[in-house]
Amino acid sequence: MRKLFLLLLLSIAARSLQAEDGYELWLRYHRITGKALLQDYRDAISGIYIPVSTPVSTAAREELQKALPALLDKAVPLQQQAQAGSVIAATPAQWPAINSLVPAASLQQAGAEGFCIYTTTGADKKIIITGNTDAGVLYGVFHFLRLLQTQQPIQQLSIVSAPKVRYRLLNHWDNLTRTVERGYAGMSIWDWHRLPGYIDRRYKDYARANASIGINGTVLNNVNANATILSKPYLEKVAALAGVFRPYGIRVYLSARFSAPIEIGGLKTADPLDPQVQQWWKEKVKEIYHYIPDFGGFLVKANSEGQPGPQNYGRSHADGANMLADALAPYKGIVMWRAFVYDSKGDEDRFKQAYDEFKPLDGRFHDNVVVQVKNGPIDFQPREPFHPLFGAMPHTPLMLELQLTQEYLGFATHLVYLSPLFKEVLEADTHAKGPGSTVAKVIDGSLEGHAISGMAGVSNIGSDRNWTGHLFGQANWYALGRLAWDHTLTSAQVADEWLRQTFTNDARFVTPVQQMMLASRETLVNYMTPLGLHHIMGYGHHYGPAPWYDKAPRADWNPVYFHRADSTGIGFDRTASGSNALAQYAPAVRKQWENMRTCPEAYLLWFHHVPWQYRLPSGRTLWEELCYKYQAGVQGVQQMADTWQQVSPYIDEERAEQVRMLLAIQLEEAAWWRDACLAYFRTFAKLPLPQGVPAPAHTLEYYRELRFPYAPH
Ligand code: BDP
């Protein structure tokens, strides 16, 4: 008896200490903690009724069968027919009774991918999760599980939800060698060598995670593409992945190398107007659809950073995109043609080049082409003004490209919640058709009535056990999906949901950590690139500060090109007296930003060369403000570390410790950023550090001599 008791005690202790490594992401399905709520849920849910079995409905059933017994800590059987307490997941076609229980207008509103969740009234209450398609039902199931995991009442559910954009994608920059360009979370999760025979369990968990946040497509390979992915053996591997993803409503797409007809087709040219080239792509596309009948289409980086493209043959981006689009059109595939281009010649402000090349092509792209535009004009900086192409190409659908992997934001070492960055660009007003013409309305198609709309995030996923290297990187993956589904959600809501599911519903944890997440992006901007500084990171790998760097082969790869500090001041004059990039924006935007007095402080050095002693609205000089911002950034990280220390007792030790160690590194690196940047900029400003800003820990020489030959990139 005593032995038994001891064993019991031991197993309880083991359970509470059970390590959590982050693998389960936000789909942990731990037992509901509040007693009363658990009872409510148990009373409301007696079983699962799913009348048919299709691949997608099977995925929905499996998820409910995994989640409900675990959340409720009781058996939740599959039922042969609906009864009181059933959770029913079906389309009206699969279970016609839905037609009398769910308003037709709601179903109409749900559209092709949306869902309705209703609690019926009366004595034999049921919960109905429905949609017009299996995929809609699956999204509804995941939403229902989100409600339970975040401990929401389910007595009177009446929810209708439909995605605001149609293409909600991850872009993997994964190479066939399994390295990941700008990846900081291990190797690629695609085990190309062992595919198609070996199906890693991760593929399914990846699909589940994506479906749970509404992501419906994935581009498997790097935009700096290798043509081999289009060869038969690799298409068989891609088909195997597509087979795992299909039941989760996820399509695969591939990055296509424009010169593939030469490299794997044996042709002498890749000229898009050459009939042989056109024929080659038609046959290649036919072959792809043979293996992957629901293939999504191509993503293309052309004539940018050394990649081949139509301009090699004197043709335009539209010629190139349309050729591929015509090959895909019979199968309803799309081309996502990237606008991230800048010339290897000439000295035009890099800011202006994408607009200069693409704006004249507006209206010349075929119907199944969408131009994919990064959030800002340069390159995924901690803060950028919105890209001037948004609102400038009314006749072309534009999709928004965001970066989840933190190439310029401290890699997977720094805690930075990116939803505020995403929202900042989505809510930016282009004024294209008067006030209220937000980027969100451009990319969801509503401003111009485009059928194609989309949002893509450059993935931060790798083979690390916790997927994203930093546990909080998971929040950025989560936010991308949730905002692509509904860009009107607030960053606070998304953080709240993610925290409750990923860690705990305990308010003593959720409230302070949510605040910490919301402040983290501004904190990072402060210690890296305050007041509109940009691209002053280490050359090549982009690790750490290197504002002094001036040895890159191209002028616009050098930090000195971007900050332009000299004895008179700092910043890039992009007004009419400088590069005049501001002329690319609508007059209302330009007017506000071209005047140093009215330009938001956050963008000041993006557009103006500002004298060191210039007085800001705060009453401080520019130099003082710069110093204070760097200092505030370091203090912000200190606060994050303090908060984390305080809330750690409310979660498992393993994850608490991981984050604690990373925050300690982040604090050191924030101080490094502050010290190195101020030591360098001081050589121009020649002014003392204001009170409260400590002297740099080392000499400028010390910082300049630091080398990181093996920093990931
Ligand atoms: C930059 C990256 C580079 C990518 C490029 C792109 O440094 O590795 O290939 O963007 O988006 O941010 O094509």
Image (tube, helix red, strand yellow):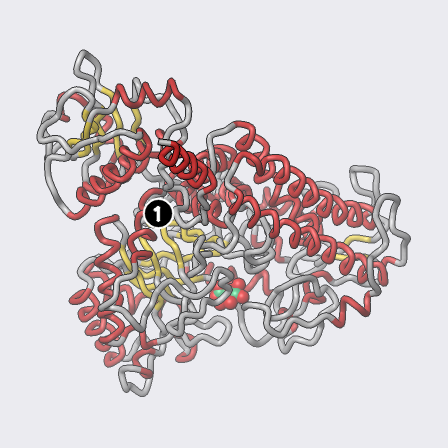
The quarter in which the C terminus is drawn is: bottom right
Considering depth in this image, is 255 or 544 the residue closer to the camera? 544
Taking the spot 19% from the left edge, 74% from the top edge, the residue there is 283
Outermost top residue: 123
For mark 1, give the secondary structure. Answer: helix
So how many labels did they put on this image? Answer: 1
User: Residue 159: x percent and y percent?
Assistant: 30, 26
The residue that appears at 62% across and 53% down in the rendered structure is 582
Q: Residues within 10 Å of mark 1 (few under 14, many from 20)?
A: many
Residue 205 horizontal/vertical position (percent): 32, 51
User: Which of the 4 quarters of the picture holds residue 76?
Assistant: top left
Residue 147's quadrant in the figure? top left
Q: Quadrant of residue 156?
A: top left
Q: Position of residue 362 (x, y in %)?
A: 41, 57
From where the camera sits, is residue 47 visible? yes
User: Which residue is at the front of the view, 205 or 181?
Assistant: 205
Q: Amino acid at mark 1?
A: Ala
Q: Does the beta carbon of the residue at mark 1 sit less than 8 Å from ligand 1?
A: no
The correct choice, above or below, for 544 with respect to 68 in the image is below
| Residue to which mark 1 is pinned | 209
Q: Nearer the viewer, residue 348 or 640?
A: 640
- Camera sees residue 431: no
How far from the left and from the top, in percent, is residue 370?
36, 56
Q: Is residue 621 above or below residue 89?
A: below
Which residue occupies the foreground of this view, 48 or 227? 48
